[in-house]
Image (tube, rainbow, N blue to C red):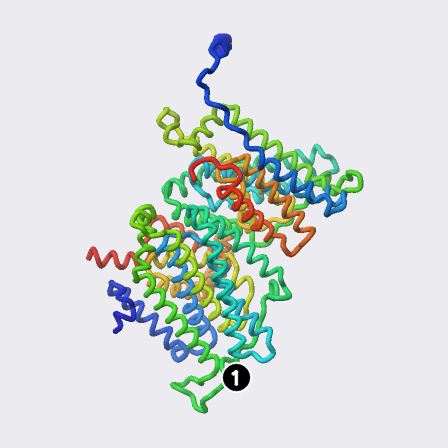
Amino acid sequence: MPIRLLSGDLPRSRPLSGALLLIALGLALAPFLFSGARPLNTAATICVYVVLVASYDLLLGYTGIVSFAHTMFYGIGAYGVGIALASSDEPGWAIMLAGLALALLLTVVLALVIGLFALRVRAIFYAMITLAVAASFGVLASQLSDFTGGEDGRTFSVPALLSPGFTPLEHAVFGRVVDGRLITYYIVFFGSLLLFLFLLRLVNSPFGRVLQAIRENEFRAEALGYRTVVYRVLANVLAAVVAALAGALMALWLRYVGPKTMLGFEVMTDILLIVVIGGMGTMYGAVIGAFLFILAQNYLKTLMGQASDALAGVPMLAAAVHPDRWMLWLGVLFVLSVYFFPIGIVGKLRLRRLRG
Amino acid sequence: MTQLDTRSDASATVVRRAAPPATALPAARRDVVPLLLAPILALAMLPLLSLPTWITLTAAGLAMGMMIFLVASGLTLVFGLMNVLNFGHGAFVTVGAYTATLVLLPMRGSLDADSLGANLGALGLAALLAMAVTALLGWAFERVVIMPVYGQHLKQILITMGGMIVSEQLINVIWGAEAIPLPLPAALRGAIFLGDAPVEKYRLLAVAVGMLVFAAMVMTLNRSRIGLLIRAGVENGDMVESLGYRIRRLFVGVFAAGSALAGLGGVMWGLYKETLSASMGSDLLVTVFIVVIVGGLGSVEGCFIGAVLMALVQNYAGFLAPKLNLVSNVALMILILLWRPAGVYTKGKL
């Protein structure tokens, strides 16, 4: 049963299995293991990022497409839910689902158009075109301030079931009061889990195998009779839809949408970093990468702040370990890992097992 | 020695004249349609705007186009010759602009003096330093970062992206995270009037510099030996290599030159915006990519046309429908790609 649930794609490395199990358990029980808003926030972000990164890996790692428009679809999903809920006085499920449906429709149309337009050309061209389109979309979102709230974004309230004031049970469960926040967390968690399992199913299906064949040698795949353009466009649309759903989950959790958190180029660089560090072409890499990255983002900065204070006398060095400069070290790590570590953490662990 | 050379040259000409090229290839037909795009666009906008507004907008568009051309030309040349798309090209823009402050800020005095000579002197010095630094940086970047990933597009994109992230952060470490104000030199502030139309002086300078660089590039590429090798290298690198030329050295040279041009573009752009921020390069990169796509990867002439066209569209759109400013770029890109899927002029291997 568990093998079927994982689509027969087992971690194939004992340390990897252990780490994955720990992460899954930790995320599943996060509300009961930790108290306070910050750890739960971290856990929810990890859940969403796992899906977001895994869907990007479907493009980058499995199909060999470099797209910079992934945050655009993530943002569309988030804004769809956000704007729908913000526009009604009585935020309910119906309007939320309507917003989500509209967002998904827009996602599919845009992904199809960009895909048909640009996937016929080489990888490098596609990367440039998606970058241009995504940047314009970001500008558009922050310009149409009546609709999207501009640079400030929009805060909104969620259906009553999910709001923090909602407490269905009188007594606490395992020392935790059951409230709307907890319910939201589990919607995010199970939503992410389902989406992740779907992606895992997808890459291990015949469809996924064709994608990998295209990545390895497009010419041969074409010669075997596969319409590679069709497969690439489909992969593009699927990845975009999953990204949009991840965005919707994130919006539901944050109860806020804004251009920086949803559409910003930083999100795109985060995704790229996580994919490469976790391991391209391995869905599990997204889990490991997102977990390490989000943890580091939330807690390493504090550590760097302390180091920076300790080095206050040294001019350059103090600036270099300033918490705002943590991307510097990540960027260096990124470049080094593309050179020396291109298969990422998961690839390395699996390789060790093969050699061992 | 010189005499001998001239004589052999002269005799060669004589020989060529004596034997008319019976089997010469027919000259390639000049493709002039793209050249007409920008004038047609400008003329088409004339009825929609009053004449002074039109002059101001067109001048602004030309100036912006020239500055973008400076940045984009290096990118497109490097791509055409080496088949490397440098996503870190924006970093050279930023580094160039920040390096210029090393000259411009201490020389405040001669910048505030109301003498065009002193102003341009200081600016020239700053631009030279910026170009030298970015050329050196480009050389090092090619050697250290790009050389190991020739021929692997995916890795190239990732590595150069990483390079850009790191350089952006390093600029924050060195110069601090706050934006640096960079006022224009006194003699270049304000506008002159062409009839009723105000045209900012700095924009005229930008147009002049851009035209100069474009002319120099076209001359170098079409008239000099180096240019011949570069053009041949874009067409077929292996062939040039097997003829005994060290194309590697040419590569590095072109990369450094492209970086220097990006640095110059950065100085110009920084003065245009009058503030510097570490992300200015990556912000500009999107525009530059659109220009390179519109122009056709690897073509300097196409790049020039693309830059002017895009800047004009952006300026007109910014005036007529401000909200659609940046989206107008993408619309232009889509229209051009529908017309010519590989950009207006295509060089190299696509």
Location of mark 1 (residue)? A165
The percent coordinates of residue A203 (x first, y second) are 33, 61
Is residue B264 in view from this perspective? no
- In the image, residue A233 sits, relative to residue A92, either above or below, namely above
Position in image of residue A226 (x %, y %): 33, 52
Specify whether B163 is left or right of B202. left
Q: Quadrant of residue B144?
A: top left
Q: Quadrant of the C terminus of chain B?
A: top left
Q: Residue at x 37, y 67 (%)?
A: A196
- Residue B318 in sight in this render: yes
- The crowd level at tag 1 (other Cα within 10 Å; few <14, some 14-19, many 20+) is few
Rendered position, B247 above or below B109: above
| Front residue of B159 and A243 | A243
Where residue A242 sits: x, y (%)?
43, 65
Give the farthest residue toward the bottom: A170
Q: Is residue B315 left or right of residue A218?
A: right
